[in-house]
Amino acid sequence: MTATTPPPWLKPTVDYGPLAAFFIAYLLSDLWAATVALMVATAVAVALALALERRLPMLPLITAVMVGIFGGLTLWLQDETFIKMKPTIVQGVMAAILLGGLAVGRPLLKPLMQASWPMTEDGWRRLTRRFACFFIAMAALNEVVWRTQPTGVWVNFKVFGILALTFLFMVAQWPLLKRHTTDLPAKTKDHI
């Protein structure tokens, strides 16, 4: 199987479609329905990516496995704790993967992002370390929110809070990206 150029709507659909399905189902019904919607939408998103790109996207696949496990436990045991812990586990796994890569001298963000942003090795190490720390902080924050707040507050945090904090974190990385850029594409250089 070879990868093909995906349509521009595919990535946002795969990344945010399951989250939107979760939120809408929660608003229309309850956490149980939202969990089912999340599981189905995640499976559909991964299948859609496979069908259109002819490859399995790694991060959505990891998320799909976690959603399947924790969503399944939530429904089977009728215990919302499992779906509420899923963001903590996903963020923790991502941090562990990034820190493990750094421990063996491989900043694992580089293969994922290198094509769109060429940087120095030091820049990749720093960015990877920052992402790992961000994931750890987000895992801890999810734990605080789901353990101390009502389900409705946690759902809003999961849908809007995590998204907003991730966006702010990405914006805050701009100076590091600029400082460690090795070569800007010709199009960008012409506009500077």
Image: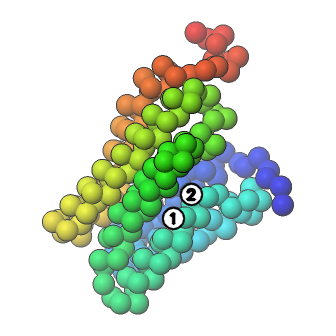
Residue at image position (56%, 22%) is: 181
**Position of residue 148 measured from the top left corner of the image (x, y, whole percent):** 15, 65
- Residue under label 1, please give it: 63
Check the picture and name the quadrant holding the C terminus.
top right
The quadrant in which the N terminus is found is bottom right
Q: Residue at x 57, y 26 (%)?
A: 120
Residue at the (62%, 28%) spot, across then down:
118
CB atoms of marks 2 and 1 within 8 Å: yes
Q: In the figure, residue 186 lies in which quadrant?
A: top right
**Residue 184 place in picture, x, y as percent:** 63, 19
Element carrying mark 2: helix
Q: Quadrant of residue 80?
A: bottom left
The color scheme shown is: rainbow
**Residue 129, image quadrant:** top left
- Looking at the picture, does residue 72 appear above or below residue 102? below
Q: Which residue is mark 2?
A: 59
**Residue 23 showing in the rendered view:** no
Outermost residue, left direction? 148
Measured from the top left, where is residue 98 in percent x and y? 48, 50
**Of the numbered discs in the image, which one, if any, rests on residue 128?**
none
